[in-house]
Image: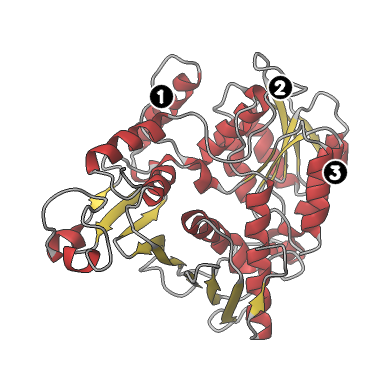
Amino acid sequence: MESEQDVTRRDFLKTAAVVAAASALPGVGAPSLLSTPSPNEVVNYGIIGIGSQGSLLLRNILTLPQGRCICLCDIYPTNLKKAVEAVGGSPQTYDDYRRLLEQKDVDAVLIATPLNLHAQMVIDALNAGKHVFIEKCLFFKEEEGEKIRQAAEAHPQQVLQVGLQRRSSLLYQVAMEMIRRGALGKVTFVRAQWHRNSSWRRPVADPKLERLINWRMYREYSGGLMAELASHQIDVANWAIGATPTAVMGTGGIDYWKDGRETNDNVQVIFEYPGGQKMVFTSILSNAHYDFSEQIMGDQGTIEITIGKGTYFRETVARVTQGASKENWWAGATVTKEAAQEGSSIFPEMRRLDQLGFVDREVQHARRWLATLGIYDFKEPHDPIWQELYNYLASIREGKPVAAPFHLGADDAYAVIYANRAIETGQKVFWPKGKS
C-alpha cells in the first residue's frame, strides 16, 4: 500500500491545484447556520482602531462587496478623519468603542488597537453579540486567554477570527500540504527571522502623543518584537511541526537604539517542541539584508517561504537515502548538489502586489473585486490580508470554517508571552500543563 511519503511530483501538482482552488480553509468550522446575517445579506461592520494596521485592514475590506463599513472608532482624531474619507459617505464615528458596540445594526467588528486592549475589547464585543476579527496577538497577559475562551464558548454562534494572515495564504497552504505528504521527510527544525534597519518608530508632532503613536515601544501596551513580528512565524512553525512548544529560552536587549524605548531592539529565542524539533527566531533593528522568511527543514528537504514567495529544496540523494524509503517523495532521477541548491518555486507565477507597478496593482484589485461577484475566475493566489478578510465575511455569511480560530490565536499568544518572560528573566520557561 502506498505510504504518505511515496507521493510523486505529479501527485503533488494535482494536490496543489486542489488546494489552490479550494474555498474552505483548515480550522475549526463555524456553525453551518449563523443567527445573523444570512448569506444573502451584506455584513455591516465597524472598525475599532484605525492606525497603521487598522487602515490596512480597512483598505482591503472596502474592496469586498459582502461587507459594508457603517462605523469607525479611534481616540486619535487624525486617524478617524482619514478613515472617514477612505470609506466615503457618512459612517458613524466614535471615540469610545463601547458606544460602537451598542449600535444595533453592527453585525461584526474588526479590532486593531494596541495589544493591551485586545482581550477586553474581544470579550465586550462577543458579549454584545458581534462577530469579531482581532489582530494578533489575541491577548497580552497569560490570564486573559481563559477569559476569552469562556466568552467565545458562551457565544458559539459568533465568529472569532485572529489575524494570523498566513493561515489564509494559498502559498502557505500548499507548502503545508507538501509537508503533510512527506516532501520534507521528518521536520526537525524551523528557522525564522524578521530583520529591519530602522528605529521602528513613527514620527510624533506633539510629544504628548508619544505613547499613543509609538505604543509598541512601551511594555505597558506592547509585547515588542515577539508580539508584533515573531507571532506570525511562531504560528507557521506550529503549523509545520503540528504541535505547540513545550519550552523556550531567549535573550535580547536595547543595545542599538538608545532612545528611551522600553521594548527590546533585538531578540533571539529558541522554542522546543514535543518531538524534539526546535524553532529559532531572531529579530534585529540594525540590519535588513536578511529581512523576513521562514525556513522549514526536514531530513529530506527544505521549504523557504515568505509572503509572496516559496521555494522547495530537495536534499541530495546521498543524504535522503540514509534511513529513508527507496521511493522518495519527489520522484525522479539522481539530484545533483547544484540542482538541489537551486530549488523549485512553489508558485512560479506568483508576484507580490508591492512588486507590481501602479496600473498592475489596480488591475489585480479589480480582478479580485470581480471574482467576489462571480464575474471573473481569479485563480492566482490572493494577498493574504485580503483573503483573511474575505474568509472572515464568508464565515459570518456562509458558515465557512474560520481561518484562524481561537485555539490557534491562543497557542500563538502564549508562545509570545513565555518567550518574553524567558528573555526578561534569562531563564528557560516551560509551558504549564495543559497549554502545550
If you read the primary sequence from the N terminus, does the residue marked by circle 3 or circle 2 appear first?
Answer: 2
Front of the two marks 1 and 3:
3
Provide residue 362's location: percent of width, then percent of height. Answer: 40, 30
Image coords of residue 377 (percent x, y): 38, 20
Q: Are marks 3 and 2 in contact (CB under 8 Å)?
A: no
Camera-nearest label, 3 or 2: 2
Asked if residue 367 is positioned above or below residue 261 in the image, the reply reads: above
Instruction: Specify the quadrant that holds the C terminus.
Output: bottom right
| Residue on which the image places disc 3 | 124
Amino acid type shown at disc 3 = Asp
Q: Quadrant of residue 435?
A: bottom right
Q: Viewed as shown, does residue 211 lie left or right of 405?
A: right
Residue bearing the label numbered 2: 33
Q: Looking at the image, is mark 1 or mark 2 nearer the viewer? A: 2
- Mark 3: secondary structure: helix
At horizontal 81% and vertical 23% (from top left) the residue drawn is: 105
Q: Amino acid at mark 2?
A: Leu
Q: CA distance from mark 1 to mark 2?
A: 30 Å
The residue depicted at 55 percent of the width and 38 percent of the height is: 388
Q: Is residue 303 visible?
A: yes
Give the secondary structure at mark 2.
loop
Q: Amino acid at mark 1?
A: Arg
Q: CA distance from mark 1 to mark 3?
A: 37 Å
Lower position in the chain sequence, tag 1 or tag 2: 2
Q: Mark 1 highlights which residue? A: 367
Residue at 19 percent across and 48 percent down: it is 331
Frontmost residue, 299 versus 222: 299
Instruction: Work out whether residue 121 can be spotted.
Output: no
Q: Residues within 10 Å of mark 2 (few under 14, many from 20)?
A: some
Q: Left or right: where does residue 69 sit relative to residue 5?
A: right
Q: Is residue 62 above or below residue 77?
A: above
